[in-house]
C-alpha cells in the first residue's frame, strides 16, 4: 500500500471512531477527497432495470434522479398514488428518460407487494438492481393489514417478501444486486427477535426504527449467503446524517442542533448510487455494510456484538419468513 493509501486509511479510521465526524458532511467531504472518488456522472445504465421503493422524497428520490439521468429503466414503488405519479412525471420531464414507471404499493402490505411483484415479473424478465429504501420513523404505533407492527412490517418483512418474489428476474440478470438502505441508528440496538415487534405498551418510534435497521443489516449478511450460488450480491448501506424530509418530520430537535453539519440528500445517497452502478468492488464480495464507499463493521458496542449469535440469527430468519408467509 502506498503512503497516500495509508494516510487515507488512518484518516478514515479516525473519522469512523468519531461518530460526529464520520456521519456528518465533514466525513463525506474528507473521504471524497482522500479516496479520490470517481464521478458517477456520465455513467450509462441503458438497458439496466432498477426497482426502488420509497423514492418520492429524500435519499430515494435523489438516487432515482441519478439513475434516470444515467438512462436506467426505472420503476418506483410508493404508497401515495398522486405523489408517485408526480415524481415519475417530474423525472421524465427533467431527464428526458421515458423508461420510468410507477407501481403503487405499501411495503408493509404483503398483498399489495405480491400484486406489484406479479406486475414486475411481467414487465421485466431481468431486474439488475432491487433497492429497499422505503421506511419511515413513526412516533405512533401502527399495524400492517396483516396485523404486524408497521415499522418492522414495512422495513423488514415486506422487503424480504419482495426479494423472494423477484428472485427469478434477479437470477436472470448478470451482476444483479439487492441493496438495503439502513441507518447508523442501528448501532445502538442489539439483535433481539423477541423485541423486534414492539407492543402498544412499550412502543418507541426511535427504538422500533433502530431495531428494524439492525434486522436489515443482519439479514443482508444472511441473504448474501443464501443467494451466493445464484450470483446475486446483497449489500446494506447507511447514508450518514442527511437532511431529508423524514429527519425534519421525525427528529426536529436533532435537525435543529446538527443542521449545519447534516449531509445533503445527494451526499447521503452517493454510496447507494455507487453500489448500484459499480461493477468491481461491489460485485467482488457480498453481505457488506457500507458508508462513504467503504465497508464498515456492523457492531460498535460489546452489548450488540454479544447479542448477534447464530441462534438469534436463525430465529430472525424464521420469524421474518413466517411473517412474510414464506416456507422452506
Image (cartoon, rainbow, N blue to C red):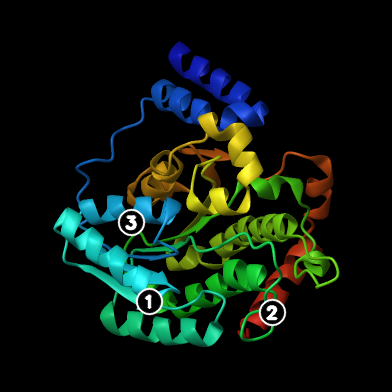
Q: Earlier in the sequence, mark 1 or mark 3?
A: 3
Q: In the rendered view of the protein, which quadrant contains the C terminus?
A: bottom right
Residue 17: numbered disc: none
Helix, strand or loop under label 1 = helix
Q: How far apart are marks 1 and 3 (CA)?
A: 17 Å
Q: In x, y percent, where is residue 15?
A: 59, 25
The residue to which callout 1 is attached is 81
Helix, strand or loop under label 3 = helix
Q: In x, y percent, where is residue 95?
A: 18, 54
Q: Earlier in the sequence, mark 1 or mark 2?
A: 1
Say which of marks 1 and 2 sits in front.
Answer: 1
The residue to which callout 3 is attached is 64
The answer to whether the residue labelled 3 contacts the one labelled 2, judged by CB atoms less than 8 Å apart, is no
Q: Does residue 187 appear to the left or right of 62 in the view shown?
A: right
Q: Quadrant of residue 297?
A: top right
Q: Residue at left 78%, top 53%? A: 190
Q: Quadrant of residue 143?
A: bottom right
Q: Does residue 18 appear to the left or right of 112 in the view shown?
A: right
Pick whichever, 257 or 130, lies toward us: 257
Q: Residue at left 37%, top 48%? A: 273
Pick whichever, 255 or 315, lies toward us: 255
The residue to which callout 2 is attached is 148
Q: Residue at left 82%, top 54%? A: 307
Q: Residue at left 78%, top 40%? A: 301
The answer to whether the residue labelled 1 contacts the one labelled 3, judged by CB atoms less than 8 Å apart, is no
Q: Residues within 10 Å of mark 3 (few under 14, many from 20)?
A: many
Q: Does residue 61 appear to the left or right of 159 in the view shown?
A: left
Q: In which quarter of the image is residue 4?
A: top left
The answer to whether the residue labelled 1 contacts the one labelled 2, judged by CB atoms less than 8 Å apart, is no
Q: Residue furthest top?
A: 3
Amino acid at each position: 500500500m502506498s503512503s497516500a493509501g495509508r494516510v487515507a486509511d488512518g484518516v478514515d479510521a479516525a473519522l469512523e471512531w468519531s461518530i460526529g465526524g464520520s456521519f456528518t458532511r465533514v466525513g463525506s467531504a474528507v473521504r471524497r477527497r482522500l479516496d479520490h472518488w470517481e464521478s458517477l456522472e456520465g455513467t450509462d445504465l441503458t438497458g439496466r432495470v432498477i426497482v426502488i421503493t420509497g423514492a418520492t422524497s429524500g435519499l430515494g428520490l435523489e438516487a432515482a434522479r441519478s439513475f434516470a439521468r444515467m438512462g436506467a429503466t426505472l420503476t418506483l414503488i410508493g404508497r401515495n398514488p398522486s405523489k408517485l405519479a408526480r415524481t415519475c412525471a417530474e423525472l421524465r420531464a427533467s431527464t428526458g428518460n421515458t423508461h420510468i414507471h410507477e407501481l403503487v404499493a405499501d411495503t408493509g402490505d404483503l398483498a399489495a407487494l405480491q400484486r406489484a411483484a406479479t406486475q414486475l415479473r411481467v414487465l421485466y424478465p431481468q431486474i439488475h438492481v432491487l433497492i429497499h429504501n422505503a421506511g419511515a420513523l413513526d412516533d405512533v404505533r401502527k399495524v400492517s393489514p396483516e396485523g404486524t407492527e408497521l415499522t418492522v412490517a414495512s422495513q423488514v418483512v415486506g422487503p424480504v417478501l419482495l426479494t423472494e418474489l423477484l428472485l427469478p428476474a434477479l437470477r436472470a440478470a448478470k451482476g444483479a444486486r439487492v441493496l438495503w438502505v439502513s441507518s447508523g441508528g442501528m448501532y445502538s440496538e442489539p439483535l433481539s427477535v423477541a423485541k423486534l415487534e414492539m407492543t402498544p405498551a412499550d412502543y418507541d418510534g426511535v427504538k422500533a426504527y433502530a431495531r428494524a435497521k439492525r434486522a436489515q443489516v443482519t439479514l443482508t449478511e444472511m441473504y448474501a449467503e443464501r443467494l451466493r450460488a445464484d450470483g446475486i450480491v446483497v449489500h446494506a448501506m447507511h447514508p450518514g446524517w442527511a437532511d431529508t424530509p423524514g429527519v425534519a418530520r421525525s427528529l426536529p430537535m436533532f435537525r435543529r442542533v446538527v443542521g449545519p453539519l447534516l449531509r445533503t440528500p445527494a451526499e447521503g445517497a452517493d454510496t447507494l448510487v455507487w453500489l448500484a452502478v459499480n461493477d468491481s468492488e461491489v460485485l467482488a464480495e457480498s453481505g457488506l455494510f457500507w458508508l462513504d464507499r467503504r465497508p464498515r463493521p456492523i457492531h460498535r458496542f460489546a452489548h450488540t456484538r454479544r447479542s448477534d449469535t447464530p441462534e438469534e440469527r436463525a430465529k430472525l430468519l424464521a420469524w421474518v419468513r413466517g411473517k412474510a408467509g414464506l416456507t422452506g
